[in-house]
Amino acid sequence: EQTEFVQKFGKTKGYDIPDADVAHLLRRKISNEEMKKMGISTLIVMHKPIQDPEGLPILLTLDDDGNFYYYYCFTAGGFSKNTGVGYVFIDPATWSSSK
């Protein structure tokens, strides 16, 4: 499964899997202009997948046009390797020092 692969990769870097609520916090903290300046068009929050109304697994996602939407975990071709796509994890060292 693609989602598990990316989450395991994040774990090897020492990152934690965020809660889905992180997507809402990011939308309030990061402006469209900031995302564009960083060269990021889409942020995929790597929380544990949740189910849409039809029972399909999704991840919450933000884009640089101010949209808040979801990403199906099992789309054809898997996760994007395109530039401009960021995967959101939690850095435990930074997170604990910011509380």
Image: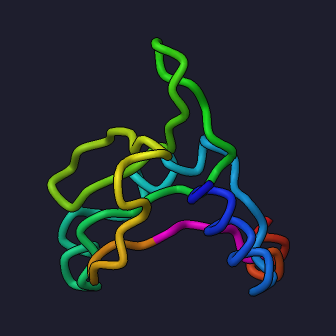
Which of the pair 69/96 is nearer the observer? 69
24 displayed left or right of 75: right
In this view, the residue farthest toward the top is 53
Residue in view at x 81 percent, y 74 percent: 92
Q: Is residue 40 magenta-colored?
A: no
Relative height, residue 63 to residue 6 (above, below): above
Pick whichever, 69 or 21, lies toward us: 69
Horizontal arrangement in the rendering, residue 98 relative to residue 49 (left or right): right
Q: Is residue 50 left or right of residue 8?
A: left
Residue 55, image x, y percentages: 54, 18
Up the image or down, 67 lies above or below 13; here it is above
Q: Residue 49 in the image: x percent, y percent?
A: 62, 40
> Seen in the image, is 98 located left or right of residue 64?
right
Residue 60 place in picture, x, y as percent: 46, 43
- State which quarter of the image contains the N terminus: bottom right
**Residue 88 is one of the magenta-drawn residues:** yes
Between residue 68 and residue 74, name the one nearer to us: 74
Q: Main secondary structure of the magenta part?
A: loop
Q: Which residues are magenta?
A: 87-91
Instruction: Name the spot of residue 23 as percent of width and height, x first.
Output: 50, 48
Q: Quadrant of the C terminus?
A: bottom right
Residue at the (75%, 86%) spot, across then down: 13
